[in-house]
Image: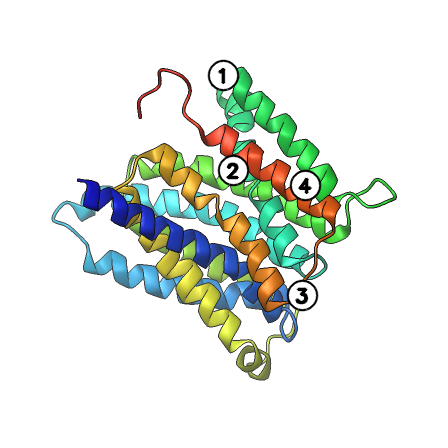
Amino acid sequence: MNNQKTLGTALLLLVALIWGTAFVFQRMGMESIGPFTFTAARMSLAAIAVGLVSRLRRGKNAKSDKRKALVGGLCCGLFLCVASLFQQAGIVTTTAGKAGFITALYILLVPVLNLILFKRRCGARVWLAVGLGVAGMYLLCMTEGLRLTRGDTLVCICALLFSGHILCCDYFARRADPIRIAAVQFLVVALLSWAAAFLFEKPAPDQLREALVPILYCGLISGGVGYTLQMVAQGMTEPTVASLLMSLESVFAVLAGALLLHERMSPRELLGCAVMFAAILLVQLPARGNKE
């Protein structure tokens, strides 16, 4: 059992590393391709990869949840599509590290939305974490004019949409095969993104060729491999520990931005990162007496 927990922890750390470094590749992709085209290409690859995994692991009772998986994949895909497009557009004018940390706000937004939409109350500790998250956001993103930059604002919207995506996944994953749902959602995102790309951009083979490495990484590694490893690892790890480990993608996003893109963060921004990470840690800790 201890060996399984160790393996699960190692896999989730790898998932966090994959997702964190993906912010760097997303920004690199924007140098030669539009956000809609990039999202469409990466999600197409993710749909193929996860779709193959879904077919390989299909069980005897797979047909019984096919309809629920299709509905779940459609709903989750709509959230993921809009969230991904906002995130990709925001990364154009903000740093990889800031985008990673702002996106991580979904961990704080989920309990808030749970209270507003489903009347699921949270303890004082969660509200304290929300307050810390707001303070960290201020330190990290606010300019001298006391306003968010355009890129930061787009990524903030993306964090809200990702929160809706998480709640949607939480609902449908209990009722159908999560891998099949993932395959359908990636297909939905790919189709909608291609439609947006041809409407607002001019996709060209040369652009796709120049952004091939970022597309491959974000599509196959971040999308396909990352999601599959998450599913495998969460079967070996306690839910609270799994959430905490996956939230480390924000730390890896900052490190990757510094190492690969040579981005520098001011002491004020670094303090904001530290406060936000403290909030993420706080909200993920189990309540007293809660044995997960």
Q: Is residue 262 above or below residue 19?
A: below
Image point (48%, 43%), residue name: 247
The residue that mark 4 highlights is 272
The residue that mark 2 highlights is 164
Earlier along the polypeptide chain: callout 2 or callout 4?
A: 2
Nearer to us of marks 1 and 4 is 4
Nearer to us of marks 1 and 2 is 1
> Cα distance, mark 2 to mark 3?
26 Å
View extreme (bottom): residue? 206
Three-letter code for the amino acid on which mark 4 is drawn: Gly
Q: Residues within 10 Å of mark 2 (few under 14, many from 20)?
A: many
> Cα distance, mark 1 to mark 2?
17 Å
- Would residue 142 be found to the left or right of residue 209 on screen? right
Secondary structure beneath dot 3 equals helix
Image point (51%, 16%), residue name: 123
Viewer-side residue, 290 vs 268? 268
Q: Position of residue 109 (x, y in %)?
A: 56, 32
- Would residue 139 be found to the left or right of residue 99 on screen? right
Earlier along the polypeptide chain: callout 4 or callout 3?
A: 3
Q: Is residue 212 above or below residue 149?
A: below
The residue that mark 3 highlights is 200
The residue that mark 1 highlights is 121
- Would residue 261 be found to the left or right of residue 21 on screen? right
Q: How many marks?
A: 4
> Cα distance, mark 2 to mark 4?
25 Å
Three-letter code for the amino acid on which mark 1 is drawn: Arg
Viewer-side residue, 123 vs 49? 123
Nearer to us of marks 2 and 4 is 4
The quadrant the N terminus occupies is top left
